[in-house]
Amino acid sequence: MEIFPNERGYKRIVHDIIHNGSYRETRNGHVKSLPNQILKITGLNHGLFPIITTRYIHWPGILGEYAAIIRGPKNVKDFEKWGCNYWSYLGDENGNLNLDYGNLWIDADGKNQMQEVAMALRNDPTSRRMVISGWNPGKQDDLSLPCCHYSYQFWRDDDHLDLLWIQRSGDFMVGIPSDMVFAATMLSCFASYACIRPRNITMVIGDAHVYEEHIATAKVQLDKVWREPPRFELKQQYDIQGFEPEHLGIFDYNHRGKLNYVFKP
């Protein structure tokens, strides 16, 4: 078994964006961009967790982000209580947020999409309707931040669960490494609830980009040699909205050190 396919695919896309992407002016800066990139994540069924190793990724904050989102965050404090501190810039003077992330997952016109998918995984495992949608066209202008990743479709067989992840926009140096951890956490929790194993994630990114001011550091990162991905263990999930960061242990995360990328909200 090859143990490094996730990071190799990630680095290939970054290289392609930098060298073949279109130079574009966007609302928050100039980027090199490519459309409709596909990133395959494998190895979860072998106990490998997809964290980038060519630089340090602060994975505890991402687990906290997932814990906040599945409960429907309404205020920056809903993230901070789980150790996730990078949503504060979106809050109003009272810290209030207007997000479809999580909130639409658990209340879409009265339907709890997370619970419905969880029940289907147990009771209707061949269903082709195991989809969580995070995109509400009627609300986009009013949101603190429109969802970057917005569709999540699950597919299971007798023993494994796969995830199709659709994302409109992906900052490949800051956002996508975090999204890989988030997606793996999401898939692992649903698989645990169904008492099967997580397996593969297919991430489809509509606009895959690298910000102009990130390119020099990205080239440094591309020159670094990846390391074996860490291993993980997840406590059995009995409540699909009950995940807490301490439920997921990540072991032997050997990385190439920190690199500084300016966050572009």
Image (cartoon, rainbow, N blue to C red):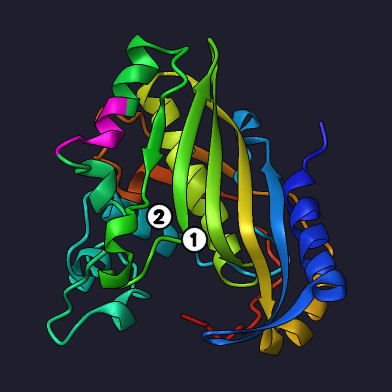
Query: 140 or 233, which is in the foreground?
Result: 140
- Distance from the alpha carbon under mark 2 to that under mark 1: 6 Å
Outermost residue to the front: 138
Task: Specify the amino acid type for callout 1.
Answer: Trp
Residue shown at 70% from the left, 43% from the top: 40
| Placement of the N terminus among the 4 image quadrants | top right
Asked whether, in this view, residue 246 is left or right of residue 13, the answer is left
> Magenta segment, which residues?
110-116
Which residue is denoted by mark 2 in the rendering?
63
Asked whether, in this view, residue 81 is left or right of residue 9, the answer is left
**Residue 172 is drawn in which quadrant?**
bottom right
Q: Can residue 100 be seen in this snapshot?
A: no
Residue shown at 36% from the left, 49% from the top: 134
Q: Are marks 2 and 1 in contact (CB under 8 Å)?
A: yes
Residue shown at 54% from the left, 44% from the top: 165
Using the image, determine if residue 50 lies above or below residue 260.
above
Task: Specify the amino acid type for callout 2.
Answer: Leu
Asked whether, in this view, residue 164 is left or right of residue 71, the answer is right
**Residue 223 is drawn in which quadrant?**
bottom right
> Mark 1 Cα within 10 Å, few/some/many (few <14, many 20+)?
some
**Residue 133 is drawn in which quadrant?**
top left
Asked whether, in this view, residue 67 is left or right of residue 95, the answer is right
Query: 150 or 50, which is in the foreground?
Result: 150
**x, y percentage for residue 263?**
52, 82
Which residue is denoted by mark 1 in the rendering?
59
Disc number for residue 186: none
The total of numbered circles placed on residues is 2
> Mark 2 Cα within 10 Å, few/some/many (few <14, many 20+)?
many
Using the image, determine if residue 24 lies above or below residue 123.
below
